[in-house]
Image (tube, rainbow, N blue to C red):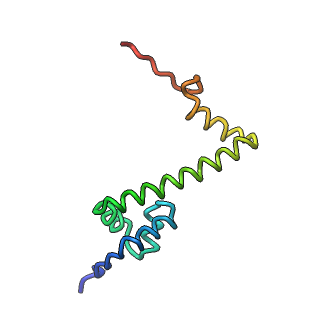
């Protein structure tokens, strides 16, 4: 007797896209919604340029949401948010703990 599960039938692209969008591009969440493993969903995405694009788009939307939340925190004076922003976006103005020296 084998412990192997029968392979899951691949849903159509629109079903996969809907799951990716609902999970904000987080593959584990989308895989759970689709009833498959994360590895299976990664394989399906890698086999389709349109699914790759949709996954990337959903992840970009998630980053937009995170940036909006960060901006709200900055406007409220949250010190950790302000420091994070300066270290990542203000590096060219010297807000960095690490300074690189170019010897050439």
In the rendered image, the residue lying farthest to the bottom is 1
Who's the residue at 52% across and 25% down the image?
98
* Residue 27 occupies quadrant: bottom left
Who's the residue at 34% across and 63% down the image?
45
In the rendered image, the residue lying farthest to the right is 76
Q: Is residue 32 above or below residue 25?
A: below
Q: Is residue 47 above or below residue 82?
A: below
Counting from the top left corner in percent of width and height, residue 70 is at: 64, 46
- Position of the N terminus, as image quadrant, is bottom left
- On screen, residue 70 versus residue 13, left or right, reads right
- On screen, residue 65 versus residue 10, left or right, reads right
Counting from the top left corner in percent of width and height, residue 92 is at: 54, 25
Query: Residue 48 versus residue 41: which sits nearer the camera?
Result: 48
* Residue 10 occupies quadrant: bottom left
- On screen, residue 55 versus residue 77, left or right, reads left
Who's the residue at 24% across and 83% down the image?
2
Counting from the top left corner in percent of width and height, residue 23 is at: 50, 65
Q: Is residue 20 above or below residue 10?
A: above
In the rendered image, the residue lying farthest to the top is 104
Q: How many numbered callouts?
A: 0
- On screen, residue 72 versus residue 88, left or right, reads right
Query: Residue 22 versus residue 40: which sits nearer the camera?
Result: 22
Counting from the top left corner in percent of width and height, residue 94 is at: 58, 23
- Position of the C terminus, as image quadrant, is top left
* Residue 82 occupies quadrant: top right
Who's the residue at 46% across and 21% down the image?
100
């Amino acid at each position: 007797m084998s412990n192997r599960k029968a392979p899951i039938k691949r849903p159509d692209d629109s079903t996969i896209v809907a799951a990716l969008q609902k999970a904000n591009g987080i593959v584990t969440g989308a895989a759970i919604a689709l009833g498959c493993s994360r590895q299976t969903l990664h394989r399906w995405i890698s086999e389709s340029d349109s699914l790759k694009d949709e996954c990337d788009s959903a992840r970009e939307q998630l980053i937009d949401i995170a940036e909006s939340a960060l901006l709200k925190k900055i406007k409220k004076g949250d010190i950790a948010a302000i420091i994070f922003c300066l270290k990542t976006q203000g590096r060219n103005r010297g807000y960095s703990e690490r300074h690189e020296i170019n010897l050439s």
